[in-house]
Amino acid sequence: MPYRRTPAVQARLDAQRTAVVEAGLGLLAEHGYAGCTMAAVAARAGIATGSVYRHFPSKAELSVELFRTVVRREVAAVSDAAALGSHRTAADRVVAVIETFAGRALKSPRLAYALLAEPVDPAVDAERLVFRRAFRDVFAERIAAGVRDGELPPQDAVLTASALVGAGAEALIGPLTNGPPGPGTVPALATFTLRALGVPDADHA
Amino acid sequence: MPYRRTPAVQARLDAQRTAVVEAGLGLLAEHGYAGCTMAAVAARAGIATGSVYRHFPSKAELSVELFRTVVRREVAAVSDAAALGSHRTAADRVVAVIETFAGRALKSPRLAYALLAEPVDPAVDAERLVFRRAFRDVFAERIAAGVRDGELPPQDAVLTASALVGAGAEALIGPLTNGPPGPGTVPALATFTLRALGVPDADHA
DNA sequence: GTCTATACGTCGATAGAC
DNA sequence: GTCTATCGACGTATAGAC
């Protein structure tokens, strides 16, 4: 009779895989990809180095999995922030996304840097493009709605959305790398966003 | 008597190195990093694959050299664009940088994509950070001047500069990847830039 | 330019599930 | 008894220090 994987074994394997991912996320948040060595991940997960390869064929694949997990979490957070409330302007919602993301980033600077800018394997780099498109879509939907309602001046919603994604990411990289971020970063970014959307300064002073 | 490298030999080596870089730049512009295999570079330079390693110890190092060469060229182009003329506003100069970069990018889409977003070796990724800082500094100088003169509303010049770098880069990635770029891209980016700087729409309608 | 340190990925041996 | 999951040390490549 051939060997069959019993539910108990499968459950243990699943738990082990989860432990690996959790360990990786912890290391990512503390030391970025630089601290995510296979040996360190294994040690934190309580298994041997070689055993990690039972779940992920290479470090690159593990890194991609970690990246995707973090991205899912962040996209959910900003989507929620954008959806909250029922009578808010489109500009308000876009700003809420920026503020939410920036706030979370500044609270977990090492993780945010890993997500946004840390030099990484090309496989993870490719995922960054996906990540940005997801964020762009969250923006574009709101901006298009604002333009339709006449709340925002005419503009190419997708282009503005892309630009805001890039602006937010790049503006955070500086504060994330150069020591402690100043307290004015998030408000400054919000002002930038409102101006870029075409909301006159008088309307948000 | 030990082997001495004669001037003639040295000259030939230098010429060969130049040929390698030129070949790499050509391939980069046509097919991005994906087309820059060591074999292809060697073939175009008219030498054997192994000979490339006489000049660059690894593909990563060659890639970094190519990246730096392109970046030098682009930074020079936008710096010139920003410096041109003697009585232009700071906002004008910032927009000129954006328009120059975007215009050049859309004329060499494959090269621009390689420069901005193509997944690459981490060593090149690290260079991207340097590249963006250089662009940021070009912006920040002009923005700070504009704020000092009262031409632009109060703002953190470095933050706005970073944001504009990210915005320009990200806004171009879409058009660069999705087939032929629409003709409205550059003007739309210019409008975004002016608004983000805090120039009222009335002043540039 | 050499040398050391670090990290990825593999492998044979062992323990344990079927 | 057979097959599999796990261990952890090893080979190899590479990067950084001196």
Image (cartoon, coloured by chain):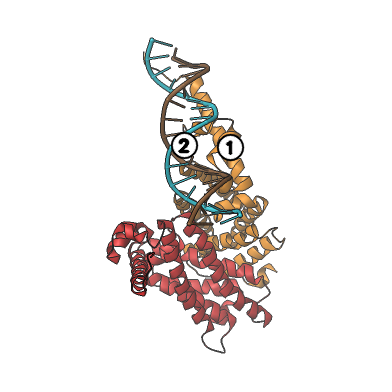
Chain colours: A orange, B red, C brown, D cyan
- Label whose residue precedes the other's in the sequence (2 or 1): 1
Q: Residues within 10 Å of mark 2 (few under 14, many from 20)?
A: some
Q: Is residue A152 visible?
A: no
Question: How far across and down, in percent of the image, does residue B173 sit?
Answer: 44, 62
The residue lying toward the viewer, choosing from B130 and A65, is: B130
In the rendered image, which quarter is residue B90 located in?
bottom right
Q: Nearer the viewer, mark 2 or mark 1?
A: 2
Looking at the rendered structure, the number of numbered marks drawn on it comes to: 2
Which of the image's four quarters has the C terminus of chain A? bottom right
Is residue C10 placed above or below B66 in the rendered structure?
above
**Farthest front residue in view:** B1
The residue positioned 54% from the left and 81% from the top of the image is B92
Among the 4 quarters of the image, the one containing residue A183: bottom right
Which of the image's four quarters has the N terminus of chain A?
top left
Secondary structure at badge 2 equals loop
In the image, residue B83 sits, relative to residue B46, either above or below, namely below
Disc 1 crowd rating (10 Å Cα; few below 14, some 14-19, many 20+) is some
Q: Secondary structure at mark 1?
A: helix
The chain letter for the residue carrying disc 2 is: A
> Disc 1 designates what residue?
A22
* Of D7 and B95, the residue lying toward us: D7
Residue A47 appears in the figure: yes
As drawn, the residue found furthest toward the right would be A183
Q: CA distance from mark 2 to mark 1?
A: 14 Å
The disc numbered 1 marks a residue on which chain?
A
Indicate which disc residue A56 carries: 2
Q: Given the image, on which type of amino acid does mark 2 rest?
A: Phe
